[in-house]
Image (spheres, rainbow, N blue to C red):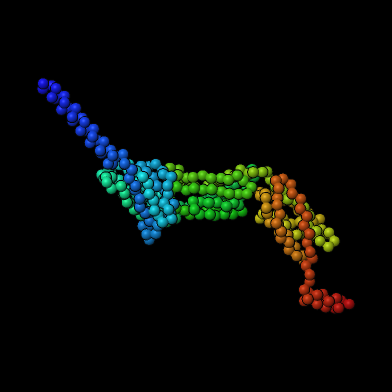
Amino acid sequence: MRVKFFAIFLISMAFFAAGAQAAYAKSSGGFRFRLSGYVSCLKDSSPLDGVSIKLNGKKQKIKTAPSGYYEMNLTAGKYKISFSKNGYKDGGFSLESTDFEFPETEISRNAALEPVEKSLKVRGRLIDRVSGEGVRAEMRVNDEIIISGHDGYFECETFPGEVSLKVYSKAHRPYGKTFKKSNIYELDKELEIFLQRYTLFSTAEGVVMEKKNSAPVYEAVVEIAGKRVLTDDRGRFFMEINESGPQKLVCSRDGFEKVTKAIKLKAGRNKIKIYLNIKEKGLIEKLREKYEKEIIH
């Protein structure tokens, strides 16, 4: 009799324990709570847009809105919420299981990120992999846009932390690399970035002539894509160019009108003819020539 009573007692206890566990799962663990709030700048309280959010170290697809607002659905548990944005120190907060109390389904938490100064220097040179010459190109270092010099050298300052570097050149394949905190030490030295060309060298060759009588113009300056050459005594010129596609051509010579026009360079050989108009003489110059002739005669 005692054994039967004890068995009934155990079954009753198991039943009530299961019911209590189910009630707890319904009230907290199995129920979705909404976490929301605003992320702002610690210095001036301005809202921060596009802030990345991590949940227990895992990056989420959501980012903060222009107002700094964010929201996500969670079940009861322990969480570490972290926020990150270039130009700011990482920030965040933790949630404990006790923060999830039914019947409340809304949890509000705000965060403020401390801004940092641009103190990380990024410098180096863009180099054509074929010719070994410097490349002038547009670069994006995090959110900052810069342009390298004609010799390929560049230098800028950005925020410490992860650095995203991208290069865009009309004649080369796009280049991109991200320096994470684990390999940020590579930025301590001057970078050498080798760019792969879409095509081989382009060459431009041709002749500069007077438009009126097609006579060759010697020692005329021809400039294409930042490179300059002088024509020889027969008006001819030749140059190798690291760029292709649309370019600006400029040709000038004392006594002639300057020519500026848009051209399109193809890969390989490009033949160009340039015609210059003789510059009209001004009134003072005409009077001077007339005076000199009268003195001679």
What residue sits 61% from the left and 53% below the top?
A: 150
What residue sits 27% from the left and 45% below the top?
A: 102
Classify residue 251 by image quadrant.
Answer: bottom right
What residue sits 71% from the left and 60% below the top?
A: 260
Q: On the rendered image, what quadrant is the N terminus found in?
A: top left
Q: On the rendered image, what quadrant is the C terminus found in?
A: bottom right
Residue 87 at least partly seen? no
Left/right of residue 196 with respect to residue 209 in the rendered view: left
Q: How many numbered circles are shown?
A: 0
Q: Out of 235 and 167, give the one closest to the viewer.
A: 167
Left/right of residue 149 with respect to residue 111 in the rendered view: right
What percent of the width, then of the height, locates residue 154? Answer: 55, 53
What percent of the width, then of the height, locates residue 4? Answer: 14, 22
Q: Is residue 239 above or below residue 288?
A: above
Work out which residue is located at the far left of the displayed protein and give it.
Answer: 2
What percent of the width, then of the height, locates residue 164? Answer: 49, 48
Residue 57 at least partly seen? yes
Left/right of residue 98 with respect to residue 160 in the rendered view: left
Classify residue 285 by image quadrant.
Answer: bottom right
What percent of the width, then of the height, locates residue 278? Answer: 79, 65
Work out which residue is located at the far right of the displayed protein and give it.
Answer: 297
What residue sits 56% from the left and 45% below the top?
A: 175
Q: Out of 295 and 288, give the one closest to the viewer.
A: 288
